[in-house]
């Protein structure tokens, strides 16, 4: 069952990515496309899921994928639902809702102990720096809450701090849940 779930994650992300390229056609811009946290987190989760079908993947790597996909789902639900981010409906639904739910479900069904959850925060921080440095250079931002042109850097800073607090809390929560569930699972196995 876990392997099927992992394969489903991989195939759904693959289908959404192919769908995006086909539907957007000439409007598709490769560098801009891979400048979305949603795309990067989904591709990462898809690769981790596919590898997990064939061999064990480090709990740290799996935990990172869970954190990034949970962040993707929550940021979409809180900040982006109803906002036009120029993503066709199928891909939008798969990448922001379906895959995050499946990745979290897979973590809950096959939990693992993790350590150093704070290391997972390096990627979101690097992404933020990349976005804020690249944005003014190319005059394009992937998300409205990271775009200072409308409301200034004060609003962007407030958004970034809010999201950082959420991601930080989520990192430790994902690690805690995985560890607790893995402990419970090992205790049950030792009693059986």
Image (spheres, grey):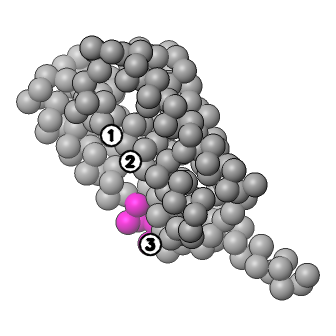
The residue to which callout 1 is attached is: 160
The reply to whether residue 108 is in sight is no
The residue to which callout 2 is attached is: 164
The residue to which callout 3 is attached is: 116
Image quadrant where one finds the N terminus: bottom right
Image quadrant where one finds the C terminus: bottom right
Query: Helix, strand or loop at disc 1?
Result: helix
Q: CA distance from mark 3 to mark 2?
A: 17 Å
Q: Is residue 19 shown above or below 133?
A: above
Q: CA distance from mark 1 to mark 2?
A: 6 Å
Q: Is residue 117 shown above or below 49?
A: below
Do tag 3 and tag 1 residues touch (Cβ < 8 Å)?
no
Q: Nearer the viewer, mark 3 or mark 2?
A: 3
The residue most toward the left is 137
- Is the residue marked by circle 3 packed among few (<14), some (14-19), or many (20+) residues within 10 Å? few
Question: Residue 83 at x, y = what percent?
Answer: 44, 16
Looking at marks 3 and 1 on the same chain, the residue that comes earlier in the sequence is marked by 3
Residue appearing at x 69%, y 72% in the figure: 182
Do tag 1 and tag 2 residues touch (Cβ < 8 Å)?
yes
- Tell me the magenta residue range: 116-120
* Location of residue 137 by image quarter: top left
The total of numbered circles placed on residues is 3
The residue most toward the bottom is 190
């Amino acid at each position: 069952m876990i392997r099927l779930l992992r394969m489903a994650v991989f195939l759904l992300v693959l289908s959404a990515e192919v769908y995006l390229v086909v539907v957007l056609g000439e409007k598709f811009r490769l560098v801009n496309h891979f400048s979305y946290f949603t795309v990067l987190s989904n591709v990462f989760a898809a690769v981790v899921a596919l590898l997990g079908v064939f061999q064990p993947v480090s709990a740290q790597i799996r935990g990172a994928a869970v954190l990034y996909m949970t962040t993707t789902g929550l940021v979409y639900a809180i900040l982006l639902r109803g906002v036009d981010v120029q993503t066709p409906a199928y891909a939008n639904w798969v990448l922001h809702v379906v895959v995050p739910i499946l990745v979290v479900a897979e973590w809950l069904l096959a939990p693992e102990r993790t350590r150093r959850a704070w290391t997972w925060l390096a990627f979101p921080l690097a992404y933020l720096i990349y976005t804020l440095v690249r944005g003014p250079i190319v005059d394009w931002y992937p998300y409205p809450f990271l775009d200072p042109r409308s409301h200034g850097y004060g609003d962007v800073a407030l958004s970034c701090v809010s999201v950082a607090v959420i991601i930080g809390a989520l990192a430790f929560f994902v690690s805690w849940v995985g560890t607790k569930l893995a402990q419970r699972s090992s205790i049950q196995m030792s009693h059986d």
